[in-house]
Amino acid sequence: MTQVYGIFGYPVGHSRSPAMHTRAFAALRIDAVYVPFAVAPERLEPAVKAIEALDLSGLNITLPHKTNVIPLLHRVEPDALAIGAVNTVYREAGQLVGMNTDAPGLTRSLLEAGLSLRGLRVTVVGAGGAARASVVGLARAGATSIHVAARRESSAASLVSQLTAAAGAASLHTLPWRPDALAATFASTDLLVQATSATLDDAPAAAELTAALPLSSLPKHAAVVDLVYRPLETRVLAAAKQLRLQTIDGLGMLLHQGAIAFEKWTGREAPIDVMRAALRD
Ligand code: NDP
């Protein structure tokens, strides 16, 4: 029987996941469909119940449900609990289990770009869900130190205090949002992670953020990744490129979070090239 997978979001029409997973199922000749479900916030609970009632095989969860879905599941993996966000649900032994594939999705995309993550000194800009996933993913992958800078310093400080235990051996620090402090830490940063939504759609905020970041203080070997993938070359990445720094766009993270979910659901190796082409199309 045809298996049904899908994504719960609201709105969900913009999601690239249906195209990516549909092409992957077809490439591996798996008899499955992937459906975007527009689930209004007040309908999340019955929608989660419907996963079992309708025998759905696996789900992605996107905004605004990534946090609110947690108490509705039977079990949530520890990293997803620490991050406070579930983006993938799988079924195991009659239970609905939540996981977060954004964190390993980012690290896989960085490894694919040729970075070596062990011993890395990282600075993360932003303190929302994507920043939290980045911190946990990079700590798991062996980063030594992670500085977190946010325009509201209190949000960076609470991220750091909440994730210190999950970060294990990696040391987490709050980085004050001041030009001198940013410049001093950038000078000993190997990887800068742009994890705010400011660069999305090249809004005026993108130019303001780029001006606020002392990219020229980064060492010559540093890499800059922007998690935003619309546009692919954000203003921050364009400025980093001007400085001849290595730049990595957010499409790789999107691709690999999907690939890790696909592998969890199907037990098969994800057809990465097919999925990447579907995202690019
Ligand atoms: P959140 O809304 O949870 O967090 C957004 C963060 O950006 C907050 O810290 C916010 O600060 C900060 N911010 C917003 N505007 C500005 C600004 N003008 N200057 C400085 N900081 C700003 O969003 P997410 O963390 O979930 O996502 C962030 C971005 O990452 C999204 O745009 C999304 O496209 C991208 N993303 C990409 C993924 C991928 O697979 N490539 C996966 C997940 C996300 P404040 O609290 O002060 O508003």
Image (cartoon, rainbow, N blue to C red):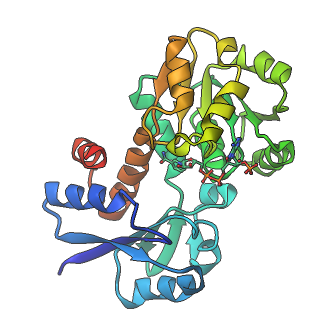
In this picture, residue 117 sits left or right of residue 169: left
Q: Which residue is drawn at 40% across and 61% down?
A: 14
Image quarter of residue 140: top right
Image quarter of residue 138: top right
In this picture, residue 252 sits left or right of residue 219: left
The extreme left residue here reads 29
Residue 16 position in % (x across, y down): 36, 56
In this picture, residue 65 sits left or right of residue 27: right
Q: Residue at x 80, y 16 (%)?
A: 184
Examine the rendered structure and indicate whether residue 173 appears above or below residue 32: above
Examine the rendered structure and indicate whether residue 40 appears above or below residue 29: below
The extreme top residue here reads 220
- Is residue 191 in view from this perspective? yes
- Could you say which is closer to the camera, residue 24 or residue 164? 24
Residue 105 position in % (x across, y down): 46, 45
- Is residue 142 in view from this perspective? no
Residue 9 position in % (x across, y down): 48, 70
Q: Which residue is drawn at 40% across and 76% down?
A: 37
- Could you say which is closer to the camera, residue 62 or residue 11? 11
Residue 224 position in % (x across, y down): 55, 25
Point out the image quarter for the N terminus. bottom left
